[in-house]
Image (tube, helix red, strand yellow):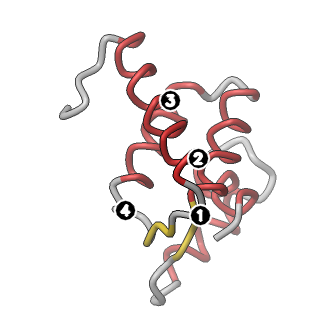
Amino acid sequence: MDTGAWFASFVPTDADHAVARAWLVRNQAPLLTTDYVIDELLTLMRMRGENRRALRVGQSLLDQGLAELHLVSPTTSVRLGVFIGSSLISSGASPTA
């Protein structure tokens, strides 16, 4: 999936949220995304004030609970890990919670 589809599926205020969620519910095929798409998604979410949601989504996507993750660049993957880790620390959340 691409950035726009992920964003619409996770953010209830997005104009395409209902359509994206309905598609995900009906979809039976495995989902695939890349570290670049996750990086772009989390950046977009944070820029639009969705910091807490970005943290939850990032953890789920990196854990491959929502889609199979293909790594394009080790640099992007490291940046994502730093984002998740620093966000957990600054929020006081536990990485295992």
Residue matched to label 2? 76
Is mark 1 in CB contact (under 8 Å) with mark 2? yes
Please give the name of the residue rendered at 34% of the width and 62% of the height, measured from the top-left corner: 65
Q: Nearer the viewer, residue 12 or 2?
A: 2
| Measured Cα–Cα span from mark 4 to mark 2 | 16 Å
Residue matched to label 3? 83
Residue mark closest to the camera, 4 vs 2: 2
Identified by mark 3, the residue type is: Phe
Q: Nearer the viewer, residue 12 or 46?
A: 46
Residue matched to label 1? 72
Under circle 4, the secondary element is loop
Please give the name of the residue rendered at 50% of the width and 29% of the height, measured from the top-left corner: 83
Identified by mark 4, the residue type is: Gln
Under circle 1, the secondary element is loop
**Residue 2 to residue 57: above or below:** below
Residue mark closest to the camera, 3 vs 1: 1
Q: Residue furthest front?
A: 74
| Measured Cα–Cα span from mark 3 to mark 1 | 17 Å
Q: Which image quarter is the C terminus in?
A: top left
| Measured Cα–Cα span from mark 1 to mark 2 | 8 Å
Under circle 2, the secondary element is helix
Is mark 3 in CB contact (under 8 Å) with mark 2? no
Residue matched to label 4? 64
Q: Which mark is residue 62?
A: none
